[in-house]
Amino acid sequence: MISIVHKHPVILSSLAFLLAGFTLPAVAAPPQQNGADMQRLERQVQSLSEQLKAVQAELRQLKAGQPAPVSSGTASAPVAAQTTAPSTATTPVASGNELPTLPATAAGASSPWDHLSIYGYGEVNYYHPTHRADLTTADLARAVFGFSYAYDDRTHFYSEFEIEHAVASSEDRGEFEVEQFYVDHRLADWAAVKAGVFLIPSGLLNLNHEPVYYYGVQRNFVERLVIPTTWREGGVALHGDFAQGFGYDLGVTTGLNLKSYDFNPAAPLYETAAELNSGDINPFQAGHQEMQLANAQHLAQYLALSYKGVPGLGLGASVFTGNVANAVGLPDQRSTLWETHVRYNPGRLDLSALYARGILSNTAAANRLNPGASNPEPSKFYGWYLQGAYTVWRHNEMRLAPFVRFERYDIGAGYAGLAPGSSAVPASFPQPFDRVWTGGLNFYLTPKVVFKADYQSFSTNSDLTRFDLGLGLVF
């Protein structure tokens, strides 16, 4: 019994408490006791006796090799069978935000709660169109909460749940969405397989779209209007990285569904730059299904390659292609989106560039069925940007990084099937192309909390020019 007590300091403390309980009343008791004092002492002795019996029961269970029961008088985490942690932990290969492997307690034991991680991000923004002050808005743009579970060092589950615009109901513009929901299993140091709803590895932001990871209050327009960040599909994929710095990600997923494409909106799809940035404007935005009873008649394929073998340098390219679900009687359509990007971040300097281009085949037949449409299907769309930032001040975890970005987008670069002399866009609607200058700064209170301010100038749709403020965070 002595060896057991030495191995379990909690039991040793309990025994010391019991001994103190027996001793202290005897020392403190006066020579003469009245009836009330005697009754109180008898109750104390009875209570201590019951506690001693409970400790003896725990000792008998420990001798038998069973876990000790949890006392009902105190709250505690669920009790799990003791397991020995592996001598070395390996980080799982995963796209998007990689999470730590399951921790173990100092004694080598872990509970189910050790396998669970909770994380999230969000942003609160203020948008002020300089030419339309009446359209100024403040918005809880998104609040995202994620849960992951480590079954073991090789198998992990990841999920994210998003609330957009604070309120989600049939009468409000907000949405509640399942952004990610997949299992990732590492096959080898260089290969892993994932299945479920996951992010498509396209561009610089889609896998790293949290507000602390990009400059400006909202995401750049090219990676919203051409690449529909945040873009997820349901499917299965193989991915991994090599020691030389090369990475790959290839998979089969759900594709686009344009059966409900809106050819004739009565009013423009957006009035402000904030609505342009957050709306479903081009076919990839309007057609990606987010696994909501997704049409799986046609599956898509994608391939992404990356290189990070030089410190501070990241190179990448990707292509996504597949047939489109469209209206009955129309010829088959195929959608293809490809992009290439580079980022160089050796220290205080942060430079990046991206080019993306999309193609939608056989749009002529669909457009002929909707003559005079205010929003015909484009056959081509593209965009590119250049961006530079520099950390001008740093103190402990705080830092200040001004930035400037120039981008050009055209989500109506080509149309087919329009009547001769007709315009693709009504005169009262914003044009589907523009050149945008953005200047601003990110102030990081910590690496996970950022305050933002920027000014955006639009060359073609000048009414969209705006000043923005924002707060972003991750945890």
Image (tube, grey):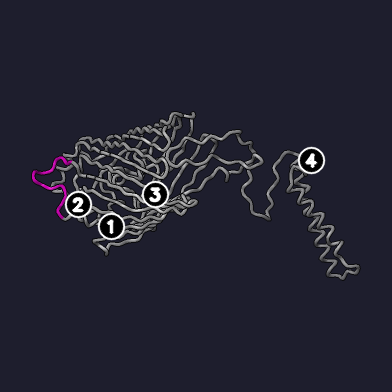
Name which of mark 3 and mark 4 comes first in the sequence: 4
Would you name the residue on which mark 4 appears? Answer: 3
Where disc 3 sits, the SS reads strand
Where disc 2 sits, the SS reads loop
Label 2 vs label 3, nearer the camera: 2
**Label 2 vs label 1: CA separation?**
14 Å
**Label 3 vs label 4: CA separation?**
55 Å
Name which of mark 1 and mark 4 comes first in the sequence: 4
Which residue is at the front of the view, 461 or 33? Answer: 461
Image x and y of residue 61, in percent: 74, 42
Tell me if mark 4 has few (under 14), some (14-19) or many (20+) residues whose alpha carbon lies within 10 angstroms of its own.
few
**Label 1 vs label 3: CA separation?**
28 Å
Would you name the residue on which mark 1 appears? Answer: 466
Where disc 1 sits, the SS reads strand
- Mark 1 and 3 residues: CB-CB less than 8 Å, in contact? no
The answer to whether any part of residue 143 appears in the image is no
Amino acid type assigned to the residue bearing label 4 in the image: Ser
- Check the image and report above or below for 92 versus 457: above
Badge count:
4
Q: Residue furthest left?
A: 421
Amino acid type assigned to the residue bearing label 2 in the image: Thr
Name which of mark 2 and mark 1 comes first in the sequence: 2
Image x and y of residue 215, in percent: 36, 49
Question: Which residues are drawn in magenta?
Answer: 414-427
The circle on residue 37 is none
Would you name the residue on which mark 3 appears? Answer: 177
- Check the image and report above or below for 380 versus 269: above
Would you name the residue on which mark 2 appears? Answer: 460
Amino acid type assigned to the residue bearing label 1 in the image: Arg
Q: Which residue is painted at 76% across and 51% down in the image?
A: 14
Which residue is at the front of the view, 62 or 148? Answer: 148
Tell me if mark 1 has few (under 14), some (14-19) or many (20+) residues whose alpha carbon lies within 10 angstroms of its own.
many
